[in-house]
Amino acid sequence: MRKALIVTALLVAAPALAACTENTDNGGGGESGDARALTVNSSADACELSATEAPAGTLTFDVTNTGDEVTEFYLLGEDGLRIVAEVENVGPSLDRKLTVNAPAGEYVTACKPGMKGDGIRDAFTVTESDEDVKVSTDEQELVTAAQTNYAAYVQDQSDQLLVKTREFVELYEAGDDDAARELYPVARTHWERIETVAESFGDLDPMMDAREADLETGQKWTGWHLIEKDLWPARAKGYTVLTPEERTTYAQDLLTNTETLDGRIQDLDFTVDQIANGSRGLLEEVATGKVTGEEEYWSRTDLWDFQANVDGAKVGYDGVRPLVEQKDAALAEQLDARFAELQELLDAERSGDGFVFYDEMSADQVKGLSDAVNALSEPLSRLTAAVLS
């Protein structure tokens, strides 16, 4: 472990604090609170923001989808690759909010109609702000603890992902398919627990985790799911298994990218809004891929991924929970209950050390999980705003 974990109990036992954050009212002028509340109109061919700049601080993007396809909205770093914050799965005629604490700098905004491609992009500037945000010493201790714990958790999961990927690659290259199939969902658990962090590296994620159904014209397919198909070809009509040489090529490519990811993760620090948004984002991954059975199309090991996404979302929430409890105790209580309800349903699908395969569940069982995910999604969507209030 590269960073010492602060005992979680310390967070839970932290005393309740009142009126810890005071926001100065800038009143009028360009630094008003309204300047940080932006609207986004995402259509089939446009991504219209109410402003192309905002003062540093807590920004809220109210995203409305006026198109016919599901869309996404991203706030990217200046390089257009690093994901600062995102909101996914915005259906036609629906609204979603994205809250992020953004320091001054240059950014890129992007809407992705159909959730494919680079999206419709534009430059966005966050200007310097004279907003005076005072944080009490006690609250700062909670913030620091949450940041330290989460960074350590992400690094540990990345370490374990690299170890398991090496083992998996060795088995796959050696042709030990039974052992490789057994290890596949276990290794991917560590990816799925930190999936939103991995996705923040826009160059690595498509090379490591792209699904065949989501490939764009001309995109080369590599990564976990290509190997998954080769290990579970039964659902692929007319599929020709990879040669030993091809296996080595794709396996080593996956390992190299995993090593690159691990190296990048070691330098990461996280703000509390990134932790909260990451928790929300992981549950969106459940809603859009795991509970639908789309993620592990060939292996049907979706519930391993489902559990891992929930694990990561819960760790993120638990880290900031002391802050939420003092700012919005009712929300903390609701989230506690909804996480517990979802976990109870997941536990009912356990089999041995893992889970039943997705196609072994009934339609009612899938619906029950989906309903529990939706029930958790609503209060979790309010987590970031509560943390930053």
Image (tube, rainbow, N blue to C red):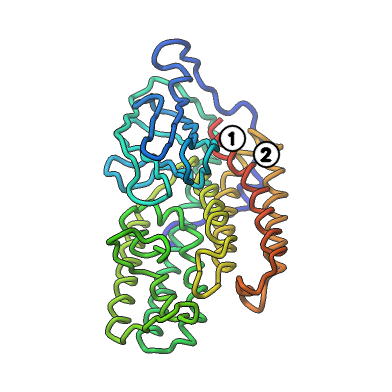
Give the amino acid at mark 2. Answer: Leu
Give the image location of residue 128, x and y in percent: 34, 24
Q: Measuring 41% from the left and 44% from the top, which residue is drawn there?
A: 113
Provide the secondary structure element on which disc 2 rests: helix
Q: Quadrant of the C terminus?
A: top right
Identify which amino acid the numbered label 1 is placed on. Answer: Ala
Relative to 14, residue 32 above or below: above
Q: Is residue 242 above or below residue 92?
A: below
Q: Nearer the viewer, residue 13 or 128?
A: 128
Alpha carbon separation for disc pair 2 and 1? 8 Å
| Relative vertical location of residue 359 with respect to residue 332 in this rendering, above or below | below
Q: In this rendered view, identify the residue nearer to me: 381 or 39.
A: 39
Q: Quadrant of residue 243?
A: bottom left
314 left or right, relative to 59: right
On-image quarter of the N terminus? bottom left
Q: Is residue 9 left or right of residue 280?
A: right
- Residue visible at 65% across and 35% down in the picture: 326
Question: Is disc 1 surrounded by few (<14), some (14 to 19) or many (20+) residues within 10 Å?
Answer: many
Of mark 2 and mark 1, the one earlier in the sequence is: 2
Q: Which residue is mark 1?
A: 386
Numbered mark located on residue 119 in the image: none
Q: What label does residue 331 carry, if any? A: 2
Q: x, y (%) of residue 172? A: 39, 83
Looking at the image, which is closer to me, 383 or 18?
A: 383
The x and y percentages for residue 57 are 43, 28
Q: In percent of the image, x 40 and y 66: which residue is there?
A: 212
Dot 2 and dot 1 residues touching (CB under 8 Å): yes
* Left or right placement of residue 385 versus residue 356 in this view: left
As helix, strand or loop, the secondary structure at mark 1 comes to: helix
Instruction: Pinpoint residue 253: horizontal percent, then vertical percent.
Output: 29, 72
